[in-house]
Image (cartoon, rainbow, N blue to C red):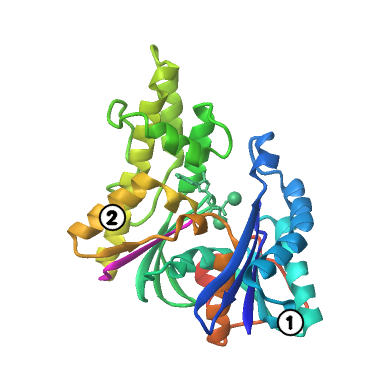
Amino acid sequence: QLVLGVETSCDETGIGLYDPRQGRLLAHRVFSQIDMHAAYGGVVPELASRDHIRRLVPLLRETLAAADARLQDVAVIGYTTGPGLAGALLVGASFAEALALSLGVPAIPVHHLEGHLLSPLLASDPPEFPFVALLVSGGHTQLMQVTGVGEYALLGESVDDAAGEAFDKTAKLLGLPYPGGPALARLAAQGQAGRFKLPRPMLHSGDLQFSFSGLKTAVLTATQQEGYGAEQAADLAAEFQQAVVDVLCAKALAALKQSGLKSLVVAGGVGANQCLRAQLGQALARRGGRVYFPELEFCSDNGAMIALATAMRWQRGLASSTPGGAFAIRPRWPLDQAAG
Ligand code: ATP
Ligand code: MG
Ligand code: FE
């Protein structure tokens, strides 16, 4: 009676195996294509699709072996159906639907951001509904009011670049290797914020919207100033990180205030950022609230979060496709349209 999760929306192939009766992840495996795409400075969609094809079966075998489980124990299969790269999504969707058909079990299409959003529930001290979610990933920056599984109301989002995207693009400007987010965070740790002055975009906009594309331009301008040298890159990185974190914190706190909720849940790749974790932790402690983060290994894309989202949908009788029926991917798909 196990739940299998399949993730192939971008450049990570992920498989997770969750046991809903024990309420526990049994095993998961991720293969990241980062090394393959690094040579191109970003994800090449066609290479991503082809690599997912190569990785899925071995990862499934490894995950089953690590959990000491058999395919026959799988009772339902969930897969990321969007948003993401169309070709990459199609690989996971056809794999999961074909496997479900052969096993005679249902297949459940899962929203990738729902996976991210529920990933903090895999931690040992999970949050309870309702909460405000701050989704900060490579493609999205959103504040959501979460009442339960499948009950997501969008409170605000970025009008341009996502936070992760801003980290990646700024890292590129500073000459750091792809993927830039973690590299920029490491560089920032050696510098000091405040020596450069960067804007805090939309900090006082009075709503819960974000904008990060101007920050990247401000960094570019700073590097073009007379007297700028590579030795200042760490200070500039620290100031950039601080600017993003300041805005994310302020808007997350405003969202809590507006919704009258006490719990904040952070999810997505940028949730791994230590500066963000520390600042949110302090801010929430001061206000008598609490902030929950996914474990580091579940911040970026993985199959475990898809297995968990599948289990939670399945237990609540939310949408599943018919084995052998038609299926579709949804490269563009707003999360608040993913209700049961
Ligand atoms: P989406 O989930 O929106 O479709 P994605 O799956 O590409 O996008 P994730 O895998 O959730 O995004 O996160 C990847 C992003 O997180 C990248 O932009 C990466 O630079 C960023 N990131 C990872 N670690 C850190 C860090 N320590 N600090 C800042 N950013 C980070
Ligand atoms: Mg990725
Ligand atoms: Fe993601």
Quadrant in the picture for the C terminus: bottom right
Q: Any mark on residue 202, and which?
A: none
In the rendering, at what x and y percent does residue 250 appear? 28, 52
Measured Cα–Cα span from mark 1 to mark 2: 43 Å
Question: Residue under circle 2?
Answer: 281
- Which structural element holds mark 2? helix
Looking at the image, can residue 38 be seen?
Answer: yes
> Which range of residues does the magenta coloring cover?
260-268
Q: Nearer the viewer, residue 327 or 308?
A: 308
Q: Residues within 10 Å of mark 1 (few under 14, many from 20)?
A: few
Asked if labels 2 and 1 touch by Cβ distance under 8 angstroms, the answer is no
In the rendering, at what x and y percent does residue 338 appear? 55, 73
- Which structural element holds mark 1? helix
Q: Quadrant of residue 53?
A: bottom right
Which amino acid is tagged 2?
A: Gly
Q: Residue at x 64, y 43 (%)?
A: 34
Question: Residue under circle 1?
Answer: 72
Asked if residue 73 is among those painted magenta in the image, a careful observer would answer no
Is residue 327 found left or right of 25 in the rendered image? right
Q: Residues within 10 Å of mark 2 (few under 14, many from 20)?
A: some
Q: Residue at x 49, y 79 (%)?
A: 23
Q: Nearer the viewer, mark 1 or mark 2?
A: 1
